[in-house]
Image: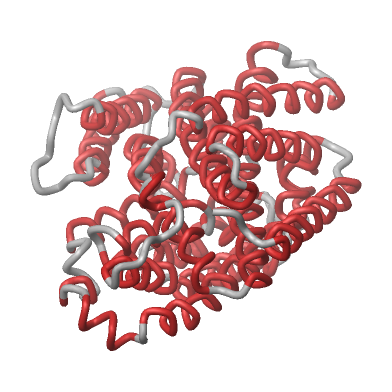
Amino acid sequence: MALSTTVLVVTTLYILGILAIGLYAARNVKTDDDFMLAGKRLGPVFIAGTLAATEVGGGSSMGVAQQGFGDWGLSAAWYVIAMAPAFVALAFIAPRLRSTLTTTVSEFFKREYGTGNHLITAVVLLLPMIGLTAIQIMASGIVFSILVGVEYQTGVLLMGLIAVGYSMVGGLWSVTFTDVFQWIFVIGGVIVAVPFALDTVGGWGAMQTQLEPWRFSLTEGIGWRQILSLSVIYFTSFSVGQEYVQRYFAAESDSAAKIGSLGAAGSYVLFAFFPAILGLATLTYQQQGHTIPFVQEYGSRYVLPGFATVVMPDILVGILFGALVSATMSSADSDLVAASTIVVNDIYEEYVNPNASPETLGRYTKITTAVLGAVAIVVALLKIDVIVAVLMFSFSFRAAGIFVPYIGSHYWDGGTAMGSFLAIATGSLVVGLEALGYISFGAWNEPIIPGILLSFLAFVVGSYAFPDRETGLLAKFSAGSGYDSD
């Protein structure tokens, strides 16, 4: 299906405009601190926009529409709604996390529990970042392949190269600056698409007449177990995920981190149902005897962009396509910056070249970004069909082991190096073995809850069994916050 010249022009102009904004912002990136933590100058609006835009990418837009079209129906909105409580909770936890004056989560483990914990945490945090980056590059490639009529692989390669190049130039400051625009246009574009979709299929009543009643239930499609699993996955994963924690560390003050986190939570609640409704409308349109562009040929991951070409005016399609491409690339940028920060800050500078100059660190950060980006592009080329499933595994893998010792150590001073190490290894192993099919938890089809419970048990028992911990990082900051708390 060839798209109109108007769609091509509008989308191209939008993407070029976003890239120009990012490159303009990159002029202020002078130091490693600017690249990794945006100079620690992000106010509440920037924090809200960058936190929200980091997740409003492939999973929260295209993935939710795909699930709404499929087995979850309207309850697919929970994939997004369940994020809101996580960011509300983090709004109150963030000041304590910021008090340690660290750049990465794994750096905290180095300073609190030593080398063994540092290395295992860095590895466990780094591996899922490849999957998360690949998913966002894949989503960008999907939209681009529709846009210009090229093969999926070509779209992934081009979008991946742009994302990697963009990440190498501007770091977190540049990504944050453009995130605010993505936040507005992606949410706005998806919301605006809904009236056009409903009008095309004959309204909400027509959908209820032609689709099964369970598809309109807020819980039946997804199920309460899945909702609970999602809520746990998000809270635990966002609490330890470098791409999220890094933004709290980059806030100009504790109050900016708190207000921004609450703002991001509110935007998720506002956005949640719209992509799910678009998925239902697409299914209705198909059952009315119509063909959705690209879905039959390439699968249900094309639901959102494919249906948009049917129902929306060309100008709005162009804006939506541009926003989807840019937002997913922005999410990929965020994941790449987070991953390269872990490699350079926690491995290269710590163990390879402790005396590296800022210029050397900057150079290796860019090299690392390119290498990790290339790996993510290769993974994206594998044509993963279920976006949400891969995202959930990535979140679960890093959260199951790291959450308990990381958050627990900020509130309990009884943890030890051995207890922390056992917790990380146990939780991560549970998720990994479940994904490989070696173990199963029956009705609990997500291993995150069993993984965290076993991690908690390992942390407490291991800490009491091996009480050999020296005074760690938190004791040094027990008197107050290391960051500006005003």
Left or right, residue 235 beside residue 484: left
Left or right, residue 220 beside residue 474: left
- Where residue 195 appears, as percent x and y from the top left, is 48, 83
- Where residue 138 appears, as percent x and y from the top left, is 52, 41
Dividing the picture into quarters, in which one does residue 100 lie? Answer: top right
Foreground pick, 305 / 436: 305
Asked if one can make out residue 471 in the rendered structure from this viewpoint, the answer is: no
4 lies above or below 334: below
- Image quadrant where one finds the C terminus: bottom right
Left or right, residue 198 beside residue 47: left
347 lies above or below 439: above
- Image quadrant where one finds the N terminus: bottom right
- Where residue 200 appears, as percent x and y from the top left, is 43, 80
Residue furthest left as drawn: 442
- Where residue 373 appears, as percent x and y from the top left, is 62, 29
Dividing the picture into quarters, in which one does residue 396 lie? Answer: top left
Left or right, residue 156 beside residue 232: right
180 lies above or below 163: below
Q: Which residue corresponds to the image point at 47% horizontal and 24% vertical from the top-left? A: 123
Q: Which residue corresponds to the image point at 43% horizontal and 68% vertical from the top-left? A: 275
Q: Which residue corresponds to the image point at 14% horizontal and 29% vertical from the top-left? A: 439
